[in-house]
Image (cartoon, rainbow, N blue to C red):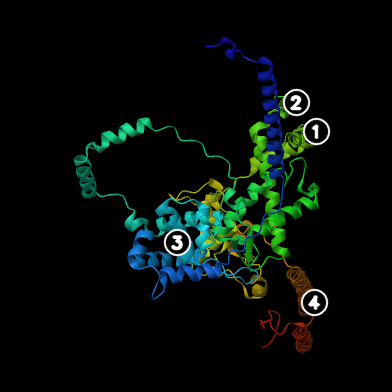
Amino acid sequence: MDPSSDDFDVAAYLQNREVEDTYVLNRFRERRKKILEDGAPRSRKYVNRDHPAANQRLIDDYFADEPTYDDAMFRRRYRMQKHLFLRIVGDLSSSDNYFTQRADAAKKEGISPLAKCTTAMRMLAYGMAADAVDEYIKIGGTTALECLRRFCKGIIRLYEQEYLRAPTQDDLQKILHVSELRGFPSDIEAEEAHIEKEVEPKKKRGPTRMLDVWDMDDDDVIIVNLDKYGRPIGKEGGILNRFIGSMVRRKQFAPIKYTSWKEMPLKQKSAMLKKIESKFEFIPPINDTTREMLKSELNDKWKQWKTDLKGKAYDPSKTEEEVASVVPDSRVDPDQWRELVHHWFSEKAQKISKINRQNRAKFEDVHHLGTKSLPIFIDEKKKKGNGVSPKRKEIYIDTRTRKDGSIVSEKASRVIEELKKHDNEVETSQSVQEIQSHMPWMDDIYSKVQGPEKRGPVRCMGKIPKPKKLKASLSENQELRDKVKQMQEQQNNTNAVLVNVLSLIQNRFSGEDVNDILRAARQVTDSSSSPNQTDSPNPYTNED
């Protein structure tokens, strides 16, 4: 063997390596450039899925009188018989508005209940990915996941008590016997104790990010019902409230560097409202009143977000630089955080914070609603009461009474005791019936116990917009009541003067002259009296 053939060419190796390194480096730069370009903000592409055609194809294949696929094929692909599946679809449609076919703002037909339930069953039966059903049923990946989530929750809600109950003692013995035949341990208690030892500690709940709403397709919206005051209600109203909370925690929408909501630029507020209207559809349609209510909710959630950050990171014993150097949440922009901390350490903010702490210390009237809003709670009580709106007295008692019957505070206990003393009173007086139709809290039992309303949210009702016409009618009615009261006082003074004059005349005169004078005085008094007043006997008459 020739040893010269095994000589290693170092120069050629180095040259080839330089070429390879250059190629790899260029490929890396191209890939990085492509990633940066793909990550840039861009408009989402609209996909015309033709839902009516997909719905009709599904009916022709499985649910028509003469379907393409027979019952055996249906049983294999749906993992159940057709009549059972149709019963589930009917129960879900009657209990959850999501499983009903609706039209969008452009009058385009939406996804049918059959398609939504079929999507969920295909994902459960075959373990399919969310976007795998798009080709046949024409439904987006995000919507498919939402169908699966609502389908599972609806099944549990409808059939848990009957079919998903805990096993009885007989059921447990049968399960243990079958398990023992198959080699599983028969001592279930010992096995449960062994499992509990191996269970890892429960993880703490993370922040509510509402990614299922943020990642919805452009043609998907959540239907939110509004009450007569334009406030969101129902389960979807709760989703909207949580979505607003997640929005104000995103630095690009609601920067925390501003000291008050008034300083927030109009551009930022408009962007948040536009994002809400792109994700939610309101019934009745949204108007300026509802937009103002949404702005108010954005304001409250934004202030609460800054309060939460202060509770996590603010320490008066540390310097401003020490607090600003540690950002308490990954969603917070470091520059905005520094400006917020600088405001907290200012003399003006220190004074305001001290006043707020003193006011909070005086506040004793707490409730146990938690994160549920008052409009949603009132709507739930209205549905339970067959459409009758609850009175403020009922709302106060329910929101201050725990499930075990105890009262949340001593002050609430005293107020509830006073409210129950008025159980038999009629709340609506005829003089204010017209006002009551718009403002049912006027002159009710709660206002008699707790006093009239002041500026701001209505107690036990929440934030309520006041129409301009209603304000005008209230001021006019108040003026009329003041005039009537003034006239009554003047009449009472006049009557008192006449009584004094008659007394003096009676003391100084007697006989027929006095009777003539008294008759003339009574005629003057009767002519000045209101026709609605009842006649009362005059103690100074001298009739024999």
**Of callouts 2 and 3, which one flags the residue occurring earlier in the amino acid sequence?**
3
**How much space separates mark 1 and mark 2, taking CA atoms?**
16 Å
Using a 10 Å C-alpha cutoff, classify the residue at mark 3 as few (fewer than 14 neighbours), some (14 to 19) or many (20 or more): many
Query: Label 2, on which residue?
Result: 321
In the image: residue 442, left or right of residue 121: right
Query: Label 4, on which residue?
Result: 501
**Of callouts 1 and 2, which one flags the residue occurring earlier in the amino acid sequence?**
2
Amino acid at the residue labelled 2: Glu
Amino acid at the residue labelled 4: Val
**Of callouts 1 and 4, which one flags the residue occurring earlier in the amino acid sequence?**
1
Using a 10 Å C-alpha cutoff, classify the residue at mark 2 as few (fewer than 14 neighbours), some (14 to 19) or many (20 or more): few
Query: Label 3, on which residue?
Result: 118
Q: Provide the secondary structure element on which disc 4 rests.
A: helix
Query: Label 1, on which residue?
Result: 347
Q: Is residue 68 above or below residue 150?
A: below
- Rendered image quadrant of residue 452: bottom right
**Of callouts 1 and 3, which one flags the residue occurring earlier in the amino acid sequence?**
3
In the image: residue 265, left or right of residue 416: right
**How much space separates mark 1 and mark 3, taking CA atoms?**
62 Å
**How much space separates mark 4 and mark 3, taking CA atoms?**
94 Å
Q: Is residue 79 above or below residue 24?
A: below
How many marks on residues? 4
Q: Are marks 1 and 3 in contact (CB under 8 Å)?
A: no
Residue 37 in the image, given as x and y percentages of width and height: 72, 43
Residue 502 in the image, given as x and y percentages of width and height: 77, 79
Front-most of residues 313 and 482 = 313
Instruction: Give the residue drawn at x 68%, y 49%.
Output: 300
Amino acid at the residue labelled 1: Glu
Q: Is residue 196 above or below residue 426?
A: above
Instruction: Give the residue drawn at x 66%, y 19%.
Output: 13
